[in-house]
Amino acid sequence: MKTVKEFDLNDKRVLLRVDFNLPLDENGEITDDSRIKAAIPTINYIMDHGAKQLIIMSHLGEPEGKTDERLKMDKVSERLIQLLERSVYKTKDCIVKRMPTDGIILLENLRFHKEETDNNDEFAKKLASYADVYINDAFGVSHRTHASVHAITKFLPCGIGLLVEKELENLDINKMKKPIFALLGGAKLKTKIPLIQNMLAKADKVLVGGGMIFTFYAANSLKIGESLFDKDYLSNAKIMLHNESLILPTDVVVADCQNPSIDIRTVSCKEIPDKSIGLDIGEGSIEQFKTILREAVTIIWNGPMGYYEKPPFDKATVEMARFIADLDCVKIVGGGDTVEVIHKHGLEDKFTFISSGGGAALELLSGKGLVALKAMEENQR
């Protein structure tokens, strides 16, 4: 797979797919521009190496194939201009009859056309017609079979950008220094089974928190009260329980199942009351996890330890974030909710690498390839 550094970009028109799917507040204002900042090195590289024109494309939100005023790329364009300190021309649609002949162009939201998520060849061919070279720097959507990352690889010489290259290097567990300890959280076991299985095979210890612990408890014949669990995946959990590398919390924070703001207490995982719901891991488990993680050379963290959106059930997640941040080891964060917590508490500078893509990072850490990059390799042979 070629990288942007392997192309002669002089006097070329370059089509660059980025991930500018930014979080917006209720007024449509950008609340976190880190994804734009992550793409700046590739944008600058292309322009500094003689490109005649750079055409940038992205999606924003889930407009489901229809124009949504709130999800137009106008605010993104404004922030991009500020960060680049260059002029950027934004188009009124991603499909245009006349494209300006030079400079930096930002196309309107790709997902205003359903053909994007349908992976439509004609839509991809039209996008490809704008340029001489296609570069994918949208790591966060490279696990999708969408036209701008998948079908488009049939129609142009292709390569990956600096961000995607960096993601692939940092999320390659086969290149990480041992001992490797994985800290995995999240609500549902269903979405994390391949990840846990791959970590059990390749990491030295796998510490599990979050809502998915209750599926493991249920598989181990423990009472879990009214806690949520994946009943269809009890057999998967039961198999993984036999692996001695798997470490589960010994205590949990529970609350009243009807009103989680009352009757909040910490109990043993073997003594969860019938009318309670588990919402965080307990103090004993936090200390247990800390003791184990102190021995790590590499830590991979993916997923919160509890219902972190609602204090006080964010305690374990925040405490683990601060603890790991201060450790002297390699600290890899696999995207998603975990990144939100780290940014919220200003800890991003204390981590070795923070992935820009939740679902894509999950795919890689699960030992799977990314379909968009596979398509690129197949179509460029």
Image (spheres, rainbow, N blue to C red):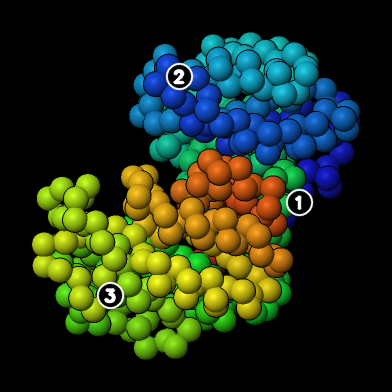
Q: Residue at coordinates 67% horizontally, 22% vertically from top-left?
A: 80
Name the quadrant containing residue 309: top left
Residue 186 is at least partly visible in this image? no
Say the numbered circle drawn on residue 2.
1
- Mark 3 Cα within 10 Å, few/some/many (few <14, many 20+)? some
- Give the Cα distance between marks 2 and 3: 44 Å
Residue 179 numbered mark, or none = none
Q: Which mark is residue 268?
A: 3
Q: Within 10 Å of the Cα at label 1, are there few (<14), some (14-19), or many (20+) other Cα atoms?
A: some
Left or right position of 11 against 158: right
Judging by the rendered image, the residue that carries numbered circle 2 is 28
Identify residue type, mark 2.
Gly
Q: Nearer the viewer, mark 3 or mark 1?
A: 3
User: Do the residues under discs 1 and 2 have CB atoms within 8 angstroms?
Assistant: no
Locate residue 181: give its quadrant.
bottom right
Percent coordinates x, y for residue 269 in the rendering: 27, 75
Q: Is residue 354 visible?
A: yes
* N-terminal-most mark, 3 or 1: 1
Name the residue nearer the viewer: 104 or 376: 104
